[in-house]
Image (spheres, rainbow, N blue to C red):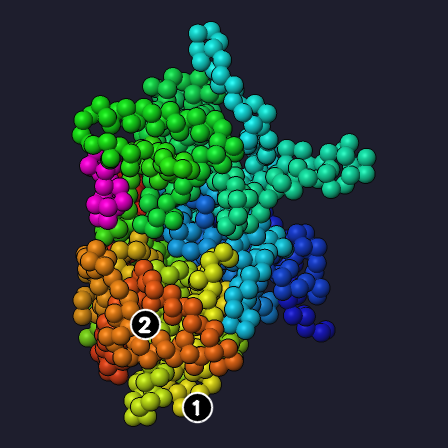
């Protein structure tokens, strides 16, 4: 008899497999026979293929559905527990959730990674090959969305009753290609094969109104407002399970997809006007089509406003209905509901809840407003003026006429209260107003968020200090008790246990497994920095991770990286304040120094960049081109290529970050002091043993405190020095003429050394720096160069460097998102854990 074919089931196993067909429960969930049966059943019944015709993608979906089956009972039991316990619930509203891939994370959190890996191996399949089939979910872009994803993981792991709410974008921000060094945007069609993790809930669609007009009338002695002639869109929810770490809790991320109230105008279709017949559908579905549509145009701005209101309206409807179904009253609404606004994008929720309470449920304003204000918390994520959203009153009133009226009423009552207090002057009143006066009036969404929330928090100690002393100084003087700091964090399950399993295993062997849910225990690694055996193990793990990343670079970029080189990494959104340009100019200066002085040979270093520039951000796109052009020159030069490599990794995303963070030796966190709210990449790098080169900005300040000043490479002006320099009058040309290295480098960039075919290509970048250098690239250049020389000296001493790296891991425990979420829960939301099944 011939042996079974690869992936087949031996006949003698059939009876046992048949007995395992029941729905997986706690007893059978990780049983090898049950896992195997579920996988094969999903191939046959869900994909409609057998082991001979199945593709790798078919097998991925069968595996994902096998895992999802084991989430279902826990998911249902979790929701039932919340209802039975009458638990207060947290609702996290965010325009982004940068989730990455779900399969591996779910396997780890369910404790199924090893059982399923072994099961698949018996079938002749490799788990890693199947996991690689999953695309990164296109639901976010940068740190804001990744923080939201980490928070969901921590909320479930700590067993807090919580829901995430966002938009189910059909396309992510974009898929980044690099052509001739330039960024080219392609559609990120992450849903082209569907998603194994989402559960559509068409029966729970929510109507959303846009445009139209309002009509005010008095009925039975009460003021009534009707929203008339509106355009209607439907919000259809898709639920995604969010499992906690091996604890039975499965929370929910509910994402909204926009659908037309009427999919097809049959009259137009029958009349032969086929485009008009589906026009309403196309306009409606545009709302959830793309993450962050380009808002350079008026139409782009309008679509962004529609997006924000759409998901907020659907979410508030869902929250209110869930509460009212159970309690039938709003008297205890703020006692049972906590809504957190992740930055200003969802701030319209304050006006929307007031509309629902006053217009739909007919509460008096004086009763509705305290309920609203006690329900919301607002997290500010930026000090950048352009990111503190403002909408022109004309646009806002056209799209959301009733909400503009509500905001004006909130503002009128608020300003009356402020003026009546006698505690602030008229200039402060104007700064705090929700309406910015001027030739074009604007609605200030950040001010709305502050006025309508009981708590306002920054995301790092320095950031919160700047919020209270600068950005929201007037509000802080009025309501000091309303402001607090919650330093960001990252989940150690994703960013150490999953991303760096070899290091995680070494840590577990050294200090036990409890660190995965109590990252403060990582501090026990500090003494091991003096253990020669642990240092050897640590270096071996780092080298293995560098090998994996080097293979990706070789395949994607055609560049060979020496594993003895320093892997110096800057990966994040491409923005001027993050100063990728400072890094690029310093690399150019190193190249020129090596060319001019043949005796100067620093330790080999590979500079790795990864970043997306917003489609409408022309300056940021030029910086990508410059980095790639520098790389083309230095990587091809036989005089320097053994000591210097520059690589731009295209399409930076979560799954790529999971390979980069464990391999990095140096973490570049070089934003101008006072511009980065927190950063979370800095935390992920430290957690994986990379040493930070950074300014005293954002959470860098606290990272330096935790890991030790001697294990952090500091450079640059402080916030106070930046402020003083700008007040005195900063002249970037003075720095250019005063520093011969800087002058020679900028002259080389402008003169075409790094663009030999187009000599003047980068002159606009240089001229821009000399005329206007808002982020002090030239001012901090000399300090940055000196800092990098210290990095080079430190890396040459392998034992010293390893001690520093281990102490970074040991000091990273404070930056677990579990700690952050506990602080939110205890100090802002006042919510308690509710174990599933309780």
Q: Which mark is residue 638?
A: 1
Residue ID at (44%, 13%): 223
Q: In front here: 347 or 459?
A: 347
Give the crowd class for mark 1: few <14, some 14-19, many >=20 residues within 10 Å. Answer: few
Q: CA distance from mark 2 to mark 1?
A: 25 Å
Question: Magenta region's main secondary structure?
Answer: helix
On the rendered image, what quadrant is the C terminus found in? top left
Q: In front here: 1 or 489?
A: 489
Whether residue 468 is in magenta: the answer is yes
Along the polypeptide, which appears first: circle 2 or circle 1? 1
Residue ID at (33%, 67%): 770
Q: How many marks?
A: 2
Q: Which segment did they paint magenta?
A: 465-485
Kindly identify which residue carries mark 2. Answer: 666
Residue ID at (25%, 76%): 739
Judge whether residue 110 can be spotted in this image: no
* 278 up-or-down from 31: above or below: above
Which type of secondary structure does the marked residue at label 1 adopt? loop
Q: Position of residue 134 (x, y in %)?
A: 55, 60
Q: Position of residue 766 (x, y in %)?
A: 38, 70
Residue 566: name its quadrant: bottom left
């Amino acid at each position: 008899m011939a042996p079974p074919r690869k992936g087949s089931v031996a006949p003698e196993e059939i009876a046992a497999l048949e007995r395992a067909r029941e729905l997986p429960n706690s007893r059978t969930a990780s049983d090898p026979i049950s896992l195997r049966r579920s996988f094969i059943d999903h191939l046959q019944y869900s994909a409609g293929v057998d082991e001979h015709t199945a593709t790798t993608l078919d097998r991925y979906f069968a595996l994902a559905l096998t895992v999802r089956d084991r989430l279902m009972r826990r998911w249902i039991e979790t929701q039932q527990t919340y209802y039975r316990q009458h638990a207060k619930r947290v609702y996290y509203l965010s325009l982004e959730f940068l989730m990455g891939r779900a399969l591996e994370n779910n396997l780890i959190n369910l404790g199924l990674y090893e059982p399923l890996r072994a099961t698949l191996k018996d079938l002749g399949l490799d788990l890693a090959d199947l996991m690689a089939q999953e695309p990164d979910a296109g639901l976010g872009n940068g740190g804001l969305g990744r923080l939201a994803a980490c928070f969901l993981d921590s909320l479930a792991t700590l067993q807090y009753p919580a829901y995430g709410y966002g938009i189910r974008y059909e396309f992510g921000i974009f898929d980044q290609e690099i052509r001739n060094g330039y960024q080219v945007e392609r559609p990120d069609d992450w849903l082209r094969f569907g998603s194994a993790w989402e559960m559509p809930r068409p029966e729970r669609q929510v109507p959303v109104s846009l445009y139209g007009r309002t009509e005010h009338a008095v009925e039975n002695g009460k003021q009534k407002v009707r929203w008339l002639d509106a355009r209607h869109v439907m919000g259809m929810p898709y639920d995604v399970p969010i499992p906690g770490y091996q604890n039975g809790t499965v929370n929910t991320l509910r994402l909204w997809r926009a659908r037309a109230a009427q999919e097809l105008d049959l009259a137009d279709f029958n009349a032969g006007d086929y485009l008009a017949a589906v026009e309403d559908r196309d306009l409606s579905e545009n709302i959830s089509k793309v993450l962050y549509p380009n808002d350079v145009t008026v139409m782009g701005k309008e679509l962004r406003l529609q997006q924000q209101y759409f998901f907020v309206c659907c979410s508030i409807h869902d929250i209110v209905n869930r509460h009212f179904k159970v309690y039938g009253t709003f008297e205890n609404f703020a006692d049972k509901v906590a809504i957190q606004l992740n930055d200003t994008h969802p701030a319209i929720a304050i006006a929307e809840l007031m509309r629902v309470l006053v217009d739909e449920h007919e509460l008096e304003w004086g009763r509705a407003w305290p309920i609203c204000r006690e329900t919301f918390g607002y997290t500010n994520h930026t000090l950048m003026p352009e990111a503190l959203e403002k909408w022109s009153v004309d646009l806002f009133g056209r799209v959301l006429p009733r909400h503009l009226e509500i905001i004006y009423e909130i503002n009128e009552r608020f300003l009356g209260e402020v003026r009546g207090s006698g505690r602030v002057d008229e200039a402060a009143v104007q700064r705090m107003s929700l309406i910015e006066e001027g030739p074009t009036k604007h609605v200030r969404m950040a001010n709305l968020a502050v006025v309508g929330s009981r708590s306002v928090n920054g995301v790092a100690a320095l950031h919160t200090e700047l919020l209270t002393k600068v950005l929201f100084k007037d509000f802080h003087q009025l309501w000091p008790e309303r402001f607090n700091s919650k330093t960001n964090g990252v989940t150690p399950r994703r960013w150490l246990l999953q991303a760096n399993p070899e290091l995680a295993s070494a840590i577990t062997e050294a200090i036990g497994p409890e660190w995965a849910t109590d990252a403060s225990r990582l501090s026990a690694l500090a003494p091991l920095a003096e253990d020669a055996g642990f240092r050897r193990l640590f270096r071996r793990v780092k080298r293995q991770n560098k090998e994996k990343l080097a293979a990706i670079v070789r395949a994607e970029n055609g560049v060979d990286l020496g594993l003895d080189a320093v892997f110096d990494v800057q990966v994040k959104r491409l923005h001027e304040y993050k100063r990728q340009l400072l890094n690029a100019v310093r690399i150019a200066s190193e190249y020129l120094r090596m060319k001019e002085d043949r005796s100067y040979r620093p330790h080999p270093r590979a500079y790795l960049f990864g970043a997306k520039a917003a489609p409408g951000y022309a300056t940021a796109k030029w910086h990508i081109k410059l980095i790639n052009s520098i790389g083309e020159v230095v990587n091809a030069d036989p005089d320097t290529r053994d000591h210097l490599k520059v690589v731009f990794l295209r399409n930076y995303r979560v799954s790529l970050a999971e390979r980069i963070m464990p391999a990095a030796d140096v973490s570049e966190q070089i934003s101008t002091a006072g511009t980065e709210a927190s950063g979370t990449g800095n935390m992920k790098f430290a957690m994986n043993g990379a040493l930070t080169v950074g300014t005293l900005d954002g959470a860098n300040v606290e990272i330096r405190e935790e890991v030790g000043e001697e294990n952090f490479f500091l450079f640059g002006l402080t916030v106070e020095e930046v402020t003083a320099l700008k007040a005195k009058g900063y002249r970037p040309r003075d720095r250019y003429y005063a520093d011969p290295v800087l002058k020679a480098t900028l002259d080389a960039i402008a003169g075409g050394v790094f663009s030999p075919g187009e000599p003047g290509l980068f002159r606009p970048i240089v001229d821009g720096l000399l005329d206007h250098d808002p982020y002090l690239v030239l001012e901090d250049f000399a300090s940055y160069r000196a800092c990098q020389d210290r990095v080079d000296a430190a890396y040459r001493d392998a034992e010293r460097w390893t001690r520093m790296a281990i102490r970074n891991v040991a000091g990273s425990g404070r930056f677990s998102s579990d700690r952050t979420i506990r602080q939110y829960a205890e100090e802002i939301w006042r919510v308690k854990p509710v174990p599933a099944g309780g």
